[in-house]
Image: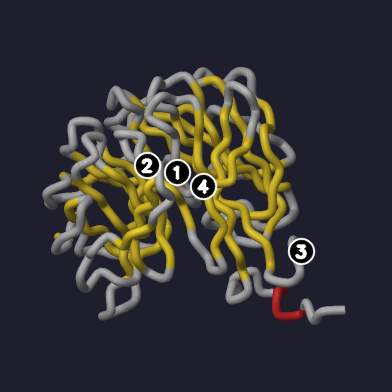
């Protein structure tokens, strides 16, 4: 029997293998795009539909969907990116969350999607990016300020940040819909983690899921604003404000009004599976990552 004791720490991922997949909401079919012998996380689908972008080993990578060729996005000194990254709606720029060398905390940078010198947007840390407004003018992110994790926005060129939430506990994962009308996010304010929605100015904060047996994270709104995909941990597997790897999770779909919530996939994953929006431009598919342990499979 293999020694499983080291996996009691879910953050030990040296033996992880990653399987990048695409789910088709019309047919329910799953396409395996590529398998990796290391951790990759959080695919973004490019607005032109031709590529997926993901993070691995501190860098951002591009996978061409027609050839499956992989290339690294040049980001110079930004070499410790986490799984909170998004593309601008016009597909011209990339925003990343990078753990800076001076204190190891996450800050947000922007750069051309083809690669280039990064520009610091959030001097304050930690800041974890999740959304870019359709007009390109604003970034939305989760940040800890004075011991509280809340949702903030900031001009995409840099400037003064604006706090949108103030409920106690973790508020995370903010992303704009394609009209710029709403920001979807997740919040633990009612006890378990649930999906929420608010106006882009922070008003009308509305709970959208009411799961009594699971913790719902990272609701991702489709480009046509009709569907939402999210990841759900089983209640009791972890604390409501935790989002860790090496867990059996579900991916669920629902209509944007909160109706027709149902499970479409069960998999071994969690952190890295679907942290950021990964919908295809035509709103028919989404990308995600499942994991296995080398030589073991799923725990």
Mark on residue 299? 3
Closer to the camera in the image, 50 or 252: 50
Closer to the camera in the image, 60 or 118: 60
- Mark pair 3, 2: CA separation: 36 Å
Mark on residue 167? 1
**If you read the primary sequence from the N terminus, does the residue marked by circle 2 or circle 4 appear first?**
2
**If you read the primary sequence from the N terminus, does the residue marked by circle 3 or circle 4 appear first?**
4
SS at mark 4?
loop
Circle 2 is placed at which residue position?
Answer: 165
Confirm whether residue 243 shows in the render.
Answer: no
Circle 4 is placed at which residue position?
Answer: 274
Q: Is residue 232 above or below residue 34?
A: above
Quadrant of the image occupied by residue 201? top left
SS at mark 3?
loop
Residue 108 horizontal/vertical position (percent)? 26, 58
Choose mark 1 or mark 3, whichever is in front.
3
* Cβ–Cβ under 8 Å for marks 2 and 4: no
Choose mark 2 or mark 4, whichever is in front.
4
SS at mark 2?
loop
């Amino acid at each position: 029997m293999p020694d499983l004791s080291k996996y009691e720490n879910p953050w030990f991922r040296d033996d992880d293998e990653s399987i990048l997949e695409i789910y088709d909401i019309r047919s329910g079919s799953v396409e395996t795009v590529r398998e990796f012998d290391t951790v990759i996380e959080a695919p973004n689908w490019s607005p032109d539909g031709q590529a997926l972008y993901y993070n691995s080993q501190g860098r951002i990578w591009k996978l061409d969907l027609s050839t499956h060729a992989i290339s690294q996005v040049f980001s110079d000194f930004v070499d410790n990116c986490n799984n909170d990254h998004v593309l601008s709606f016009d597909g011209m720029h990339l925003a990343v969350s990078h753990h800076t060398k001076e204190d190891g905390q996450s800050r947000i940078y922007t750069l051309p999607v083809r690669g280039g010198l990064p520009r610091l947007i959030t001097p304050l840390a930690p800041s974890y990016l999740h959304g870019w407004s359709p007009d390109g003018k604003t970034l939305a992110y989760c940040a800890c300020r004075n011991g509280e994790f809340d949702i903030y926005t900031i001009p995409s060129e840099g400037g003064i940040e604006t706090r949108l939430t103030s409920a106690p506990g973790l508020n995370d994962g903010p992303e704009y819909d394609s009209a710029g009308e709403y920001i979807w996010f997740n919040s633990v304010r009612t006890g378990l983690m649930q999906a929420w929605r608010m106006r882009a100015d922070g008003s009308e904060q509305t709970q959208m899921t009411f799961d009594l047996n699971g913790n719902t994270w990272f609701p991702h709104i489709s480009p046509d604003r009709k569907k939402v995909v999210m990841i759900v941990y089983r209640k009791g597997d972890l604390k409501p404000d935790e989002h860790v790897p090496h867990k059996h999770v579900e991916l669920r779909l629902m209509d944007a009004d909160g109706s027709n919530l149902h499970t479409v996939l069960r998999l071994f994953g969690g952190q890295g599976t679907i942290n950021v929006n990964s919908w295809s431009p035509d709103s028919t598919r989404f990308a995600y990552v499942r994991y296995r342990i080398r030589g073991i499979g799923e725990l």
